[in-house]
Amino acid sequence: MDTDARAKKSVQVYSSRTMLAVYDFYVTYFNNRFAWNCPREKLVSHYRRHVTDEHLEVGVVSTYYLQRALPASRLKNLQLMDLNPDCLSKAADQLKHCQPKPIQHNVLHPFEGSAEPVTSIGINYVLHVVPGQFPQKGVAFSHLKHLLRPGGVLFGSTLLSIGVKRNLFGSLLMKAFNRMGIFNNSDDGLDGLRTALAQNFRHYRIEVQGAAALFSASDEALS
């Protein structure tokens, strides 16, 4: 199965409106706290630290973090990117007061003029569902970097299988999700994430919280 087919399969679970409706509770709250040991408040804080008034959000199954971090009063440019049209439609509706631009695109492919330059890019809980290992899925950083203005920051988080501490529930759930094709992170570890970031940015930072790795990267020094 090629990467496009695997990517589409990995997002099919989020295609139903019912699943999208329960995502914020089941994934954003329950799994974060009890499976991954990374409370959603930690991710909200990560967003508030890095999001700017010109922002591209990659992977929009949930807009929970974005809605709590966006500088809406001075927002100039908000773009939403996802492979799943249902996710895009729901996110655009939730953020319609920000007049977002939806972009249906696979981040493993180069961009062809559909996205505009921004000063921040968020890619939260996306990489662990992307097919391949970090040498393959890390190309997303290369493609996204071309959309950053000078001094801009790419930030996000991903769930890892190697080099992090997981409780029993989290270990069993992650294995099950990998077998089902929802996750593709059996071989994802800290070293792979570090290498992928270092290959694309001069500066990067990674913070591990439970099974999650929160990262930020830029060609300028990070504050």
Image (cartoon, helix red, strand yellow):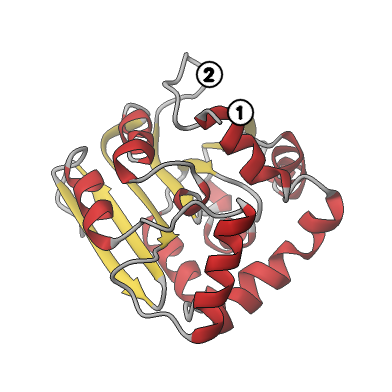
Q: Nearer the viewer, residue 185 or 84?
A: 185
Taking the spot 32% from the left edge, 45% from the top edge, the residue there is: 134
Q: Amino acid at mark 1?
A: Ile
The earlier-in-sequence mark between 2 and 1 is 1
Drawn side of residue 78 relative to residue 49, left or right: right
Q: Please say if 158 is above or below 119.
A: below
Q: Please say if 21 is above or below 6.
A: below
What residue does disc 1 label? 103
What residue does disc 2 label? 114
Q: Quadrant of residue 105?
A: top right
Q: Nearer the viewer, residue 56 or 10?
A: 10
Q: Position of residue 24 (x, y in %)?
A: 70, 66
Q: Position of residue 112 (x, y in %)?
A: 47, 14
Q: What is the secondary structure assignment of the residue under circle 1?
A: strand
Q: What is the secondary structure assignment of the residue under circle 2?
A: loop
Drawn side of residue 32 relative to residue 88, left or right: left
